Every structure is written in structure tokens, then in C-alpha cells.
Image: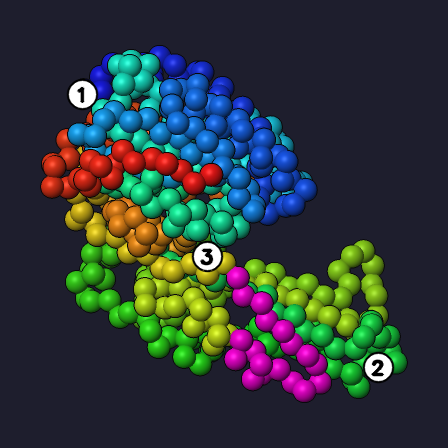
Amino acid sequence: MEPHRALVYARKHRPRFLAELKEFLRLPSVSSQPARKKDVAGCAAWLAAHLRRVGLDRVHVIPTQGNPIVYGSRQRGAGYPTLLIYGHYDVLPGEPLGEWKTQPFAPTVRGNRLYARGASDDKGQLFCHIKAIESFLAAEGKLPINVKCLFEGEEEIGSPHLFSFIARNKNALRADAAIISDTRMIAQGRPAISYAQRGGLRAEITIEGPEHELHSGSFGGAVHNPLQVLCEMVAGLHDERGRVTIPGFYDDVVAWSEKERRFMRRSGPSDEKIRQEAGVEGSWGEAGHTLYERITTRPALTVNGIAGGHSGHGHKAIIPSRAVAKLSFRLVPNQDPSKIGKLFRDHIAEVTPVTVRSSVRVQSPIRPALMNRNDPAMQTAAFAYKKGFGTSPLFLRSGGSIPVINSFQDELGVPVVLMGFGLPGDNIHAPNESFHLPTFFRAIDTCIWHLAAFAHRSPDQRSRPSERIRERIAL
């Protein structure tokens, strides 16, 4: 099935697509804030209703112990390949609100960008696929392939209930490939496919000292300050060369071949480009590795925040009773999050002075992911990019983490393609997040081309028809 009529439909209805995306973005579906739970559920209901409106015929809002999963599908028939489309409708908080030029949940177009929390991560990107499906159904009355859409509401908190859902529904979710649009391109008009993602692990250290705050004049110099202990502990997690000092941390890190490193130097961003994007003049980290390697093929430990004592207006002469640090690990192939968590616990216990008490909490383990950039599913996506953007994509590694990739690979046994449409200037996870509107519209065209191209997969690249049409979802 040729996509030309679908493309004409999509271009004609761009103003309405933008208006609908704004409606989607107004819903404050913040998964990390319990007070927003009803808002997240309302967003799931809106998304399900929209999937029904565009023409998906098996749509469910599936409750979990956390936030709902939204599932929808449209079957062309047993003789056609099946594509599983994943995205997440939950977003990060809008805070700090004072740094936004407009409110995070009041979508606003300025110039050629749409500003709102979730505009790029990930509501805008998943919406491109929905509009591509709508365009085919409206223009042709049918799709060229079978599609299954799986949209979750907990990605930003580590997808705690998604993996058990996938395990329970392996047959229903069976597909020939999975597509995820939650990554970014190199620049405007320069698409990219990510073929590697780092894993992750979140950690929290708590240091406790006296039962309550003490007067620093009465006890300063005699009682060990928990905040001081924590700062010294955190400072000691890296050496002067930027390497993590936890014993055994690098034992399983893969040493990549010189051939792979040359490929990365040809295809990846330069050190200067990465510094410019970060807005810094100097760089930091492991010697002997480019900045691109440091943020993709090398592991990292980042301090995300420290709290303790008095940080409000004025001064308070105290020794705090408690201090907390939040950290995150980015892990690379062969590193096991559970092993890293144990090494971290053991290290903190070893360096804790007898004058205080320490505790460690680790959560949200994510294994690193690798994908074969020569897989036919990758080449289909590359073709679609070429048609939608007029140029072939680069194949890049990513320093971020998408928890569901390993689940799709291991549970469903399908190739996963990361076909992202974000841009470096989108400010994801930061104030004034936005989506570049010319990219949004070209992304819809690209998704239309992808649906059409996916229909031409050869039979030996497809799963068995009986598996593709089995679709009893465990609600």
C-alpha cells in the first residue's frame, strides 16, 4: 500500500494535529507525584479515547498497582507483519516553575516551537505514530500492517509495573518488531537511530547522627556532623581522574574494539559539540576517552542532590541530625545493576565512621541494552527517515536508559528500533521543554512511510501468523 494519500491527509490536517497535541499536553500526568495520580489516570482515559477516535478497535485502559497502561490495536490480517509501538504518557514535574517562560501545562507556541512539559518527552513523539495511524485509516480505510500500541504511565519512575504486564501478555503482544520514539536526532533535519542504551540504578544514602539538631556553639568540634560526613563520603566516590572509586565497579565493563571506537568517532558528536550543548567551557571525566564515549560506553555515577541542615532564609547555627544524598548510576553492557547495588552498599558501609549511622536504598534497576544496527527492522526505519527527512540517519549510542527495551528483547524476542524525533535543544527534563514543530510534522510523515515500508518485510522476517493475531490481553 502506497502512503501518498495518507501523506496528503496528514499535511492537510496539521493545524488540527497541533491542537490535539496541545490538548494532550495540558494534562499534568506527573507519575512521580502521588497528588497527581488522578491527573495521570485522566490522561490515560483521554489517550484511550483518542485511540478509539482515530480508528484503533481494541482499546483498553488496564489498571495496575500504579498507573494505568493504555493498549490499542488494529489488525489488517494474519498474512501481514505486526508492529508494536511503545511510548509513555507520563511526564516529569514542571518544577522549578519560576524558570518557565510560560506554565509547563499551558502549551504555548513561540516561533516554531511548542513549549510544555512532555512536549518532546514523550507525548509529542508518541503522538507522531498515532497521527500516522490516523492518516492511513482516514485516507485508505485500512492500515498496511497490523499495529499494537502500548503506552505506559510510569516510565519516568522506572516502569515498576510494566514488565510483569509484558510477561503475562507475551502472546498477545507478539510482533515482528517494536518501535520506540523516545530518543533524539543529531540536529534539525539530521535523524539518528540509537543502537545502544546505558542501564541505570538509583540510590539514596542517609546519614544519621544525634537524635535532634544540636547547637553548633555547644557541640561544634565534639559531635560528628552527618552533613559533613555525607559530603566527604560523596566527594570520595570519584578520584582525581574522574573514575568511580567503588571497589569492583569496573570489573565487568566491556572494552570496545578499536573498529567500534573509530565508527563512533566518525558518527558521533565531537567533544566541542557536547560542551556547547551542555553550555560549559570545560569537560570532566575519565582520561583516554572522548566525551561521546564517556556518556555512552563508559559507566557514570552522578550526584543528583544533597539535603540536610538549614538551607532557608537567614542562618541557623546547628549540627543537623540527618543528611540525605540522591545519586544515579549509568551502567554499560555486562554491568549488572543488582551487583553494582551490592558493591555500593558494601562500600558505603565500609567508609561510614563509627560516629554516625548510614543506610542505603537502591531502586529502579535497568539493564543496559544493545541492538543490531544491521537488523532489517533498523534498515526499514532508516528508509522511512530518508523519505521523511530527505537524508539517511546516523547510528548512534545513547547515554540514557529506556527500561522496556530489554523486556521486549527477552520476553517477546523482537528487534527494537529507537526512532527518535527529539532535538538537542528540546530541554527535556528541564524548564521550557519544547518540541520543534517542523520536526513534529516531518516525523508524522516519517511514521507514515515507516508503516508502509514495514509492510514489505519478507516472510522469513515475520513471526508466525497465529502468534500475530492472538490478542487476549490480561486486564
Q: Which residue is mark 1?
A: 1
Q: CA distance from mark 3 to mark 2?
A: 42 Å
Callouts 3 and 1 close, C-beta under 8 Å: no
How far across and down, in percent of the image, does residue 21 sit?
48, 25
Q: Which mark is residue 219?
A: 2
**Residue located 33% across and 73% down the image:** 252
Q: Is residue 204 left or right of residue 391?
A: right
Classify residue 469 as left or right of residue 239.
left
352 in the magenta segment: yes
**Any part of residue 390 in sight:** no
Residue drawn where x is 46% and y is 61% of the image: 365
Q: In the rendering, which numbered label is found on residue 218?
A: none
- CA neighbours of label 3 inside 10 A, class few (<14), some (14 to 19), many (20+): few
Tell me the mark number nearer the camera, choosing from 3 and 1: 1
Amino acid type assigned to the residue bearing label 3 in the image: Glu
Q: Nearer the viewer, residue 279 or 358?
A: 358
Kindly identify the amino acid type of the residue bearing the numbered disc 1: Met
**Labels 2 and 1: the sequence-earlier one:** 1
Q: Which residue is mark 3?
A: 281
Q: Rounded to the nearest whole Å, what is the CA distance between mark 2 and mark 1?
A: 79 Å
Where does the magenta region start and end? Answer: 345-363
Image vertical order of residue 410 relative to residue 298, above or below:
above
Mark in front: 3 vs 2: 2
Q: Give the alpha-carbon distance from disc 3 to disc 1, as whole Å.
A: 51 Å
Is 360 located above or below residue 26 in the figure? below
Neighbourhood count class around disc 2 (C-alpha, 10 Å): few under 14, some 14–19, many 20 upward: few
